[in-house]
Image: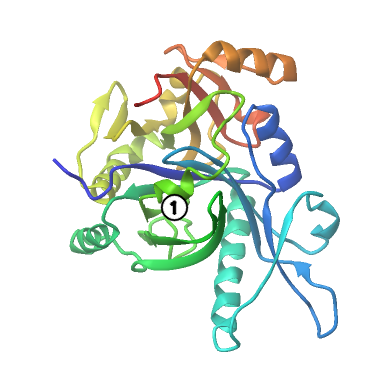
Amino acid sequence: MRHDIARLHHVGHVVGSMGEALTLYRRLGFAVPPPSYPTMAPAEGAEPEPFGAANTHADFRRSFIELATCVRDGDATRIPEDAHLVPLQAPASQLPLLLERIGETSAKLAFMLRRFEGLHILMFSSPDIDATATRLASAGVGHGGVNAVRRPVGTSSGIRTELVRYLEIDSDGTGTGTGNGSTTEGRVGAVADLDADIQGSRLLDHPNGAFDLIEVVLCVAEAELALVQARYENYLGRPARADGPARAFDLDGAALTLVPDTHLTALLPDERPAALPAFVAYAVAVRELAVVRDILKEEGIPLRESPSGDLFVPAVAALGTAIVFRQASVPA
């Protein structure tokens, strides 16, 4: 059966310090380019200053890990030296709306950081984002409709325009979400499949051998497991399967796993959720676990092994989210 949500598109690791996050991810063996910061002059004649939200990606062929933060007062001295400062440019008629959207994004990130530093964003990949929007609406799932963003991207053949079409699922009203574009556990939605040509022009060769995002773990209170499962069955348009006490949604080469808080340590030893519900871990596929082990040992980064044989860096050593490494074969 063909689904309008096929796999994982990206996760968002929301951090307090972009510099600290860059250092961590590069030590973990990910190739991460300099982050982008929007800038704007605070007054006529003044020098542009970073504001709003900043991000960068660890990219794979069909997915990525996003590092995101909000720019706060006094952050000018904490911005990484290699940051890419992007002057805000828009027609006067569009500027107020653009500033409003940047402000909303920054406010959401600030809210997430107040909750905890860690994984707060989960976006699924859709081969037909319009069909996804229609199905969600028919299932009674609120969302803000399909939005479109165009941005210039440097490729080997020159500058191309990347079109990103996405939707964000709205809060179900039962938790502490921030309203539109937010559920209780964070920002959840769907994005049209990545453009293979543009994605292939990005930094994809990671020293640790990572090549895909293959699992996200959502920890929920045991008493709420059935309710959260029902929500995600509506979101994804498919049933979950039982995996012991956990519930798993099988995607194309990936999975979303719902785990009750009483079972988390059995899945990832010694891990504790910072809140409930919360995205507590993500897994990447790597070519050789031995390579990962050697890199992390050389860097002095704590490394643990799960009962299934995966290696993972605990959340306390990875800015609030466990990062799991799983050996797999690279698809043809």
Quarter holding residue 139 = bottom left
User: Is residue 221 something one can see in this rendering?
Assistant: yes
Tell me how the rendering is colored: rainbow
Q: Is residue 232 above or below residue 249?
A: below
Considering every residue shown, the one lying at the far bottom of the view is 93
Provide residue 132's location: percent of width, then percent of height.
Answer: 25, 57
Q: Is residue 76 above or below residue 285?
A: below
Q: Residue at x 70, y 21 (%)?
A: 301
Provide residue 2's location: percent of width, then percent of height.
Answer: 17, 44
Quadrant where the C terminus is found in the figure: top left
User: Is residue 276 something one can see in this rendering?
Assistant: no
For mark 1, what is the residue? 184
Q: Residue at x 40, y 46 (%)?
A: 196
Relative to residue 93, is residue 195 drawn left or right? left
Quadrant where the N terminus is found in the figure: top left
Q: Residue at x 56, y 69 (%)?
A: 104
Q: Is residue 101 above or below residue 160?
A: below
Provide residue 44's location: percent of width, then percent of height.
Answer: 81, 85
Q: Mark 1: give few (<14), some (14-19) or many (20+) Cα within 10 Å.
A: many
Considering every residue shown, the one lying at the far left of the view is 1
In the structure shown, which secondary structural element does the residue marked by tag 1 occupy? loop
Quarter holding residue 295 = top right
Quarter holding residue 227 = top left
Q: Residue at x 47, y 66 (%)?
A: 149
Provide residue 156's location: percent of width, then percent of height.
Answer: 56, 49
Q: Hey, what amino acid is under mark 1?
A: Thr
Which one is nearer the viewer's eye here, 16 or 101? 101
Which one is nearer the viewer's eye here, 213 or 218? 213
Relative to residue 25, is residue 312 drawn left or right? left
